[in-house]
Amino acid sequence: MPAGPPPPRPRRRISMSRESVRFAPTWVTYVVMIGMFLIISFPIVWLLITSLRTRQEYIEDPLGWPSWAFSNFVDAWNTAHFSTYVPNSLIYMVSVVLVTLVLASAAGYGLARFDFPGRPALIVSFVIALTIPFSSIMFSVYDVVAGFGLLNTRVAIVTVAVAMGLPFATFYMRAFFVGIPEELSEAARLDGASELGVFFRVMLPLARPGLLTLSVFSGLWAWSMYIEPLLLATTDQLRSVSLGLAFFSSEYAGANQPMIAAGIIIIVAPLVVVSVAVQRHFVDGMTAGAIK
Amino acid sequence: MGERGLSITSDHVTGAPAGGTGCSGASRALPGRRRAWRRRLTGLLFAAPATALVAVFVLYPVIGTFRISLTDWDGFSPDRTFIGFANYSSMFADSVFWDSVGRNVLYIAGLFVAVTIGFLIAVLLWTRPRGWVVFRTVFLVPEMMGASIVGIIWLQLWQPVSGGLAAIGKALGIPFLASSPLANPQWAIIVLVLTQVWASTGFYVVISLGGLQNIDPNLLDAASVDGASRLQRLWHVVIPQMRPYLALMTMLAGIAGLRAFDLVWIMTAGGPGNATQLLGTSAYTMAFSRNEFGQAGAIAMTIVVLALVFTAITGRSNTRES
């Protein structure tokens, strides 16, 4: 049995010349595409322009050209306490990603490769967990966290965020492990590898594309996390960027629009850059996760 | 990510992204009872940590929410008096609750519109026109930003007087844009629904594109040869072939609608008055503004039940058809 990574997913490429998949004249397609492009980018472009204007300029004419007023970014960073929120969110993001990867790949592997008592029940309960909206269980989550004495701790925020994402992440990783030939792990076992050895040395390296996509997903979730810290932390010290930004932008709304715009850009820009850089993983993960 | 947990409705949803159809090694016979037993234990141990976390922080809270809903707990005091289903009967008698149900239905309808638009745009992109990858990337940006940041951005655009849309409305003579509709009880919910459509459409474009990729173009060729018009090809070939994806997107949209919280909470917090309360926000308001956790629990249980029923219906029609 040849070792090596599983073969890439076969993709049907549809040539551009195929007339039967054309449902509208090309110009209609472009009009729709560009229309949607403009509608989606408009708010971000407006923010970008606004963030580069001085407050005075903005008051005189909200729709003018930018004057490269970069001081807004410094003001926003300081006024909005980003020096607290950005490290917070980085901590949340890194912890959520790492814990999710470890737990989801272990559970996904367990579900993909082993039969054990309670496995069907476990799958059903993960499917149920997948559909439970957080907004409906948050009071009890609050109660549980309070019961552990973990209100106002980072541990609680990370744990709850991980738990909410785990059902999806587990199924996603399981799909990856199911696709890896059984012979590879059998061979490693015959060579005397322990179960943990098989998992860490054989399976995980082969599932690397899945781990990468999953990091992108859970990292983006964790970065824009809002409701978990809103619910579980009362102190300003634990706020995520989204939560901090929401408070900041409603506090200064109307008073200093360019500064708010700069604050939003500070948080959104890395997201957009990362999104564009990893969008292939994102699309693959979304399509695979959604369908199979 | 607003639509956290896109995915997977039943056990055979495996489909390895990397390897086609693998078969689970679970049923493989192993020599020796002891080894089989050990294998079982190993599987259990691998799954245990994740299971424990989901059980404590997702599944138990469903039961916990139900228990809270049977009490008059205020969220802080140690005494929780059991009052049976009183919270449910007062909920059903409360017009604010029914209004929020209606609004939530409208919100979900908005997401269905997003599914439809997304699907149609994906059909247009099927020919892979020049630059389509760039467009796809841009379409996904709102989804990647997450509902909370989308809410923050649009709230700024809608700021009365100082916001971008108010300025544009003034400049172009569109009084509606300058009328701060988010503060208007009639318009606020419409604005929220439109914002959600703005945020979600790109996501459905991408899911639909993934589905279209799996349709054999020869089917369409054959239909063309038989003289089927564009509309007929769309209706009789593409839509039936896409049915599992359409069912999936319907399910995701329904759940996302029931889940909706961040965007609404940031943009209006359920106001003005209660004009934009959805089920999630009204439960939150009930608990943390009015200290009626029991009542909030009843609303929350409604969300749970609706989400499960919705998944069961769409999941079942999906498996039946495929």
Image (spheres, coloured by chain):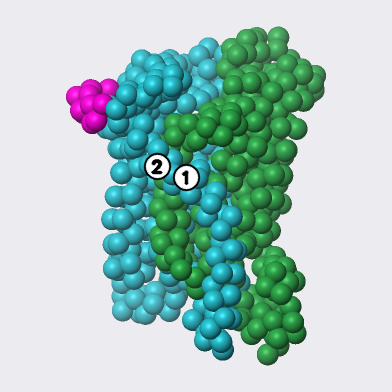
Chain colours: A green, B cyan
**Mark 2: secondary structure:** helix
Magenta segment: B83-96
* Type of amino acid under label 1: Val
Pick the residue in front: A245 or A13: A245
Q: Which residue is mark 2?
A: B62
Give residue B217's mark.
Answer: none
Q: On screen, B187 above or below A158?
A: above
Q: Main secondary structure of the magenta part?
A: helix
Is residue B89 one of those drawn in magenta?
yes
Quadrant containing the N terminus of chain A in the rendered view: bottom right
The reply, left or right, for residue B102 in relation to residue A20 is left
Q: Which residue is mark 1?
A: B58
**Mark 1: secondary structure:** helix
Disc 1 chain ID: B
Please identify the residue farthest to the front as the structure is shown: B34
Among the 4 quarters of the image, the one containing residue B70: top left
Q: Position of residue B278 (x, y in %)?
A: 36, 30
Q: Are marks 1 and 2 on the same chain?
A: yes
